Amino acid sequence: MARTKVRRGWRRWINVVNLGGVLIAAVTAIPLYWLVVSSFKTSSEVAASPPTVVPQTWTLENYVTAFVSNDLAVYMLNSVIVAVSTTVLVLGLALFAGYALTGRKLKGGTGIMTTLLMLSVFPAIAVLTPIYLIERQLGLLNSYPGLIIPYVAFNLPFAIWIMRNYLAGIPTTIEEASEIDGASPLRTVFSVILPMSKPGLFTVGVFTFTASWSEFLMALTFNSETSFRTIPVGIALFGTQFTVPYGAIFAASVSATVPIVLLVLIFRRSIVSGLTSGAVKG
Amino acid sequence: MQIDRRGLLVGAAGAAGALALAGCAPRAERTDIADWPTEVGDEPVTIDWWSANIATNEGGDLRPRLIEEFTKKYPNVRINLVAAPADTDTNRTTLTTQIAAGSQSPDVIHGDIAWPGQFAENSLATPLSTLVPDDFWDQYPEGLRTAASVDGEYYMFPVYIDNSFLVYRQDLLDKHGLQVPGSWEEVLETSKALIDTGDVDYGFVFQGNVYEGMTCNTVEFVADAGGRLTNDDITASTATSSEARRGLEFMASLVSEGVTPRASLTYIEQASLDAFTTGRAAFLRNWSYAYDTANSPEASSVAGKIGIRSRPGFDGTDETHTTIGGWGSYINPHTAKPAAALAWARWLADEDAQQLIVREGGVIPARTASLTSPDAVAAAKPQYSIAADYTLVPRPTATAFYPKVSQGIYVNANSIAAGQSALQTGTSRMERQMDVAIAGQAL
Amino acid sequence: MSVQEKAADTRPATAGPGRPDSARPERSARTSLARTRNRAAWLFASPALLVILLVTVFPVIYSVVLSFARVSIDYDGFQVEEYTLGNYGALLQSSDWYRALMFTILYTVITVTVELVLGMLAALVLERLGVTRGWMLALLLVPWSLVTIVSAQLWKYIYDSTYGIATWGIGLVTDSPPVILGEPVSAAAALMVADIWKTTPFVAIILLAGLVMIPDEQYEAAELDGSSAWSTFWRVVMPQLLPTFTIAVLFRVLQAFGVFDLPFVLTQGGPGTSTQTLAIMGYKVLFQDINIGPGAAIATSTALIVGVGCLLFLRAFRNQARGVD
């Protein structure tokens, strides 16, 4: 480290890095604070100008409205069903596919990985139209499979990428030992690979769940019927013809966000390693 | 035995593809219009009614009351209320997605009066003419009948019309000894005077956002100037006519002379009403419900201090104009409960429901007889008496491409009003875009 | 496709993937083992690849076909009336489409650039934070994990012309409160700010991971050379960070090109069509105007542009990777 003047007392803490850290924290946290605080304001205070930094009256009425009069419970149930199903399916498929792509088992494996990487961030609008028309012909619109199948397909590329990068770290000697023992490839996966892949599975699980929970465009298009709406669609379409109840919208938003934030914070190591494995190992 | 891996993949793909295209779920049977049952049986049946809020007198929700009254007559039919999205365009888009996909729900749709053109073209609504007696439609004013039908075939049961009104701060006019304006020029002057006193921030506010509501306002101002935006059979745009220009020029002058805030060009109904009920604006153009809400102490800080009149015209003209807003019932052509859906949709347009709207609703009933009935006189709603004198101006909705035509109008009107486009270029562009849209070429 | 793996792949090709050795009996045993592995690998990978193929690739092909069709809708579905180039003709004559294309490109370039710069700065700060780094990372993950629609609604409220806090704040220093979402330029800027706020943490985390891999010796060597912070950054940090940086750019560019949720809630593509991205326009044409042929044309052209962009980018990246090695 470069030699700097040694500062005494509180001045020690003032340097570019710490100030930068404070700035980053503030810029990140202020809108979040605004979101949460507004969900506890009365409808007249939410519309107050100038805005109040701390609510004069704290109220839970927005939460009541969101759940009681606005079907939020239905939307949450739908989101849970879709997200959980998608996650389970993706985990199963990605484990096998990721394993298959490790080592040199498959010719053209590198090409597949590259294609998968590109597909993982392909703009959904490009495929929205045909998927909608196909689902319409098949009668899959406004149903759970109608969302789950596309979600699985769109989350698989990134999931396979993560699993493969993770499983590539397992020494081949362990695989070979299992083969020499006479185990079929299937048994190898279940008894040897699966137990060792838990961290990778956590990463894929959290990413897939988060992505399915937040997905909007397809949910809006395929499941617009109220009984099948997911949370993002519900929140985006909140309100009646002439009113936009921000308080209730934020109450619904906070309720919908807290599960994901908790999930992400609990599994944050998995997430960071997931985000970076693609970047660093790629 | 070698499994050729390529063969495996191709085979699997083919099998999956065949399965997919064979169709895992058969499409539900649609009731043919010739076989449409008109009698509701006795078995319990539930239908889904897609509807946004319908205002009551006090700014509440009329829908539960309507359902309650209907259930007295048809006790075995349960109406399940499905909340529709806020903005009318989003409302229509999510709805058309569902119905175009063959969804059986919702069964009855509470929809905008501007939709028959597009709905008929895209098979999104049931044609109604054969489902009720021919004279059923005589109950409604002419303008409404035209709007609800396409090439003589009806697609919508009218429920209520909406007219727009000018609501103003009577207390401020009294305080400063000013007269209620009788023309737009007077609105301009009075606004400036009131802004100068410092009692209000804004003079006149309206819905100027880049959306359908702006089309309504534009059509109204153009009608005030004596013109229309299209010819009678909607085959060509007349946006560059001198009357249309005059109307748009006035809208631009409202902003350039500081009478209307630029913020008004981002307002939809709620925001404009907020500006008025919080005391910031002196004059407001809005729909019928706005007067009731602004006069209700729970929702407004200017309750009891306001007055209402028709939208004025320009100096020297007698006629006052409002565009035909309105909502009515459409029947989903894929509904699985055709008889019940028909019963509900028809009931909402018939006498019982219309009288309920007169007594308790914050909107204007579609049925002519109801508007002049004793109940209406007893309700003593100023909107009803003003409505009687209004000249109704239709938007150019009787075209299958109305959404795009409307877009051509509201995008350019907003731009002209904001001063971003000069009048000349703005109206030329509006005319060009409207013509392209009318020809079905707009993207 | 790390460099090591590519090197590994260029082994001498034999009858099957396997270790080259010369003992014959062992070899046949090994290659049959390899075949079993290979077969199993295909069986394992097929379901996933099949799903991806069916849901991603097949619809794109379907979309291409429809984009050359004139489609009409009746009660029972849609019918192809005829095949025509008219949809693309309409697209190329539509000023709205050009505007959407230009805006999407502009939006992508600006947001990705700003996010990279801010993300880099944030990553540099985070790297040097000691104890607090864990907390900061946790905080940064929160905007990333917000449902996009929720973030959009929040910013819509912040920008609201009547009671938005941003409106009020800016109104303190200007003559009259601005109508942020009502003017094309400020609406576009507002959109970008909201996107940047939500996505910069993601970029910062990726860059941070790359940063921590740079060995301390390189920093010390640069310091001994008397290099300033600025030149250290460009001579030591950036070259090492380049692969990470490139991946981050690729991810972000592809995501930004398809942006939908944020403009849908914040501006609906408005005022007018000034913040209409390609995705918003595609959605409107198909679902608001129920115009299937042109909608498919928009989807196909978007996919084409993205695909070409990817290929060009990866080609450039391969060269870069070879150069670094």
Image: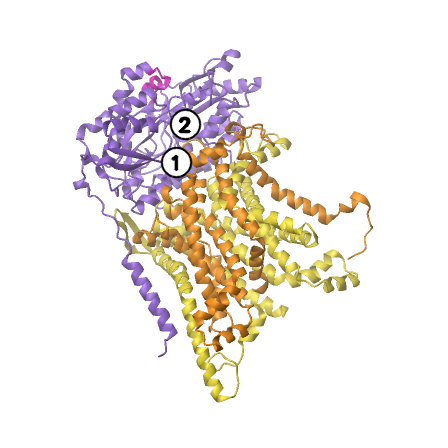
Q: Chain C is drawn in which colour?
A: yellow
Residue mark closest to the camera, 1 vs 2: 1
| Whether residue B430 can be seen here | yes
Q: Where is mark 1, residue-wise? A: B88
Image mark 2: chain = B
Magenta-highlighted stretch: main secondary structure? helix
- Callout 2 secondary element: helix
State the image coordinates of residue C276 (x, y, percent, origin top left).
47, 45
Along the line of sight, which residue is nearer the eye, A198 or A261?
Answer: A198
Q: How crowded is mark 1: few (under 14 residues within 10 Å), some or many (20 or more)?
A: some
Along the line of sight, which residue is nearer the eye, A203 or A43?
Answer: A203
State the image coordinates of residue C93 (x, y, percent, origin top left).
41, 50
Q: Which colour scheme is used?
A: by chain
Residue A107 within the segment the image draws in magenta: no
Query: In the image, what residue type sits under mark 2?
Result: Phe
Q: What stretch is highlighted in magenta?
A: B379-390
Residue B380 within the segment the image draws in magenta: yes
Relative to residue B362, is residue B372 drawn left or right? Answer: left
Along the line of sight, which residue is nearer the eye, B191 or B338?
Answer: B338
The first of marks 1 and 2 along the sequence is: 1
Q: Residues within 10 Å of mark 2 (few under 14, many from 20)?
A: many
Q: Where is mark 2, residue-wise? A: B221
Query: In the image, what residue type sits under mark 1?
Result: Thr
- Callout 1 secondary element: helix
Residue A35 sits above or below residue A200 on the image? above
Question: Are the residues under badges 1 and 2 in a single subunit?
Answer: yes
Residue at (46, 26) in percent of width and height: B273
Chain letter corresponding to the colour purple: B
Mark 1 and mark 2: span between their CA atoms?
Answer: 21 Å
Chain letter corresponding to the colour orange: A
State the image coordinates of residue C101 (x, y, percent, origin top left).
48, 51
Relative to residue B289, is residue B259 drawn left or right? Answer: right
